[in-house]
Image: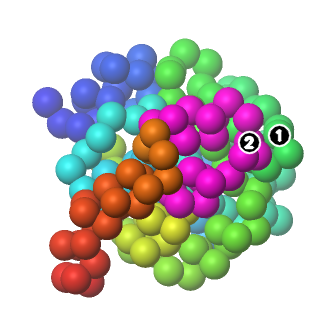
Amino acid sequence: MTAAEVFESVTNGGSKDFSALVRILNANQPWCLIGGLAVNCYLEPIYTIDADIDVMTDRLSQISKQLEQAEFQIQKFEHSIDAKGQQSQLRIQFTTDVRYQEFLSDKKEHEVLGQRVPVASLDNVIRGKIWAWKDKRGGPANERKRAGLASDRRNFIQNCVRKFRPKLSNS
């Protein structure tokens, strides 16, 4: 089975929703993956049903409208816009945090769930993960991320250094 087929099965249609998302985002460039799916491009894959996305903030309204037309449910929060397909378990989160805007100029294409997509650079993925871990804003989604990243900051940073050091030295 391909990664996309496994993801499709586990998320009840998440791969199809991801493909629809990519089509909409490609029509609204620039954009890039910044979360767990981005991490999977640089390390051994981990299981995630989250697709964290960085786009030009002035395009979020148009992207939200297009996703609604494609029958995604949209929820707006103070620091993000979340989208979810009708049936799948894929959770899409667009950051509205301006710190991520610079990631759009430092990205590389990778294959993710059978799609060629722009992914934030390794340095920026690490930086974004540290921000997400430290961020007390964002409600339950960030609480889940913080809990999943590490039980404490020191362990998280040590794990990042241990896992990313070989990749950084080869970049």
Q: Is residue 80 left or right of residue 109?
A: right
Chosen colour scheme? rainbow
Q: Is residue 149 magenta?
A: no
Give the x, y percent position of residue 123: 43, 75
> Can residue 20 be seen at all in this image of the molecule?
no
> Can residue 164 be seen at all in this image of the molecule?
yes
Give the x, y percent position of residue 29: 62, 68
Q: Secondary structure at mark 1?
A: loop
Q: Which image quadrant: the N terminus?
A: top left
In the picture shown, does residue 123 fall above or below 126?
below
Q: Is residue 157 left or right of residue 70?
A: left
Q: Which residues make up the magenta segment?
A: 129-148
Specify which label sits upstream in the sequence, 2 or 1. 1
Going by the numbered disc 1, the residue's amino acid type is: Phe
Residue appearing at x 42%, y 17% in the figure: 12
Q: Is residue 134 magenta?
A: yes
Residue appearing at x 25%, y 45% in the figure: 45
In-front residue for pair 157/143: 157
Q: Main secondary structure of the magenta part?
A: helix
Q: Counting other residues with Cα less than 10 Å from the Cα at mark 1, is it few (<14), some (14-19), or many (20 or more)?
A: few
Distance in Å between CA atoms under marks 2 and 1: 8 Å
